[in-house]
Amino acid sequence: MRRTIWVMPIDTAIDAHAASTGKIAARERSRTMKGTGWTAEFMDRSINDLVELIATQGPLTTREIGALRPDLTERVTVGVGTRNPASIASHTRLLLHAGFEAKIVRGRPSGSWISSEYAWHETVSWLGRPIANGVTRQAAAGIVRRWLARFGPGTEADLRWWTGWTVTQVRQALDDIGAVRVVVVDGSEAYLLASDLDDVDDPEPWVALLPGLDPTVMGWKQRDWYLEETTAARVTDRNGNIGPTIWADGRAVGGWVQRPNGAIATELNHPISADHERMLADEIERLMAILGDTRFRTRFPAPNQADLLA
């Protein structure tokens, strides 16, 4: 969840900001001040100026903001003392912090839906209400409740990894929502919502093509029950980023990529049935129809990408 872009309803965004992003914002601000020599007063004043500019003249792209406030485009080095220091325009870093602090939000991308350029909006003007007004403990309970509803059963380690919280905060949230301890197949202890204890019917066979960094693949710290070592070695880069995956009946069985001509190339790391092969062919056809003329590259290429693009 940390430092990752998520699509979520506004109520969820309010909880996510109070439970996680607020702490990230404070930590990142401290790092920036240490690396640049900026004071808290300078950052507050500059961020407020940029937010006011966006509110009165926006929505505005980063480039447009730089043209309107050239006094805030002086280059500054961030990441001093790390392996990857970078020289950037001051306003780009200040906009990042304004976003962390939920004062501005990204709007629609410029051009196509895969464009990396977008306009900034003042938060209330875009969403209709602020998102930086949640209560931390209540928000944490809300996040854990949603996580268990989607990913449960899950372990305490899974929740700590996904949220970046302390053991105390995770346990408090689990207690606040009345999560129930259960034992999973490998004998370890996990948690479920009290409303999610009934037996469930086995689903019909299914196949899905999931994009890179999909929440389904990234939902748990312990992944060997759905992502075996053979597949993981082919779909995961050295930093743990997971590329596009093929799923069959709840397990990742391979990976895929879009070639420059629009074709979807696949690699299966585990055998699947003839029925699943037919469903995979249907999913490929459906995905190609959705993408149409759009061409994209995976942001974090997995080891299988080069072979599939060859």
Image (cartoon, helix red, strand yellow):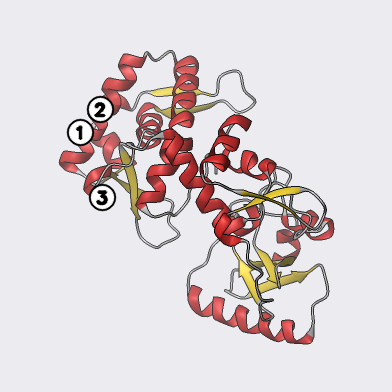
Q: Residue at x 66, y 69 (%)?
A: 199
Instruction: Judge whether 279 appears above or below 56 on screen.
Output: below
Looking at the picture, which amino acid does disc 2 mark?
A: Asn
Instruction: Tell me the CA gap for discs 3 and 2.
Output: 17 Å
In the rendered image, the quadrant that contains the C terminus is bottom right
Real-space Cα separation, disc 2 to disc 1, in angstroms: 6 Å
Q: Position of residue 227 (x, y in %)?
A: 76, 58
Label 1 Cα neighbours within 10 Å, binned few <14 / some 14-19 / many ≥20: some
Q: Is residue 237 left or right of residue 102?
A: right
- Quadrant of the snapshot with the N terminus: top right
Contact, mark 2 vs mark 1 (Cβ under 8 Å) = yes
Q: Quadrant of residue 62?
A: top left
Q: Which of marks 2 and 3 precedes in the sequence?
A: 2
Say few, some or many: other residues with alpha carbon within 10 Å of mark 2 (under 14 / 14 to 19 / 20 or more): some
Give the amino acid at mark 3: Trp
Residue denoted by label 2? 48
Give the numbered dot on residue 126: 3
> Disc 1 marks which residue?
52
Q: Is residue 276 left or right of residue 168?
A: right
| Percent of width and height locating residue 225 | 78, 58
- Which mark's residue is nearer the viewer, 3 or 1? 3
Q: Are marks 3 and 1 in contact (CB under 8 Å)?
A: no
- Residue at 47% x, 51% y: name it: 6
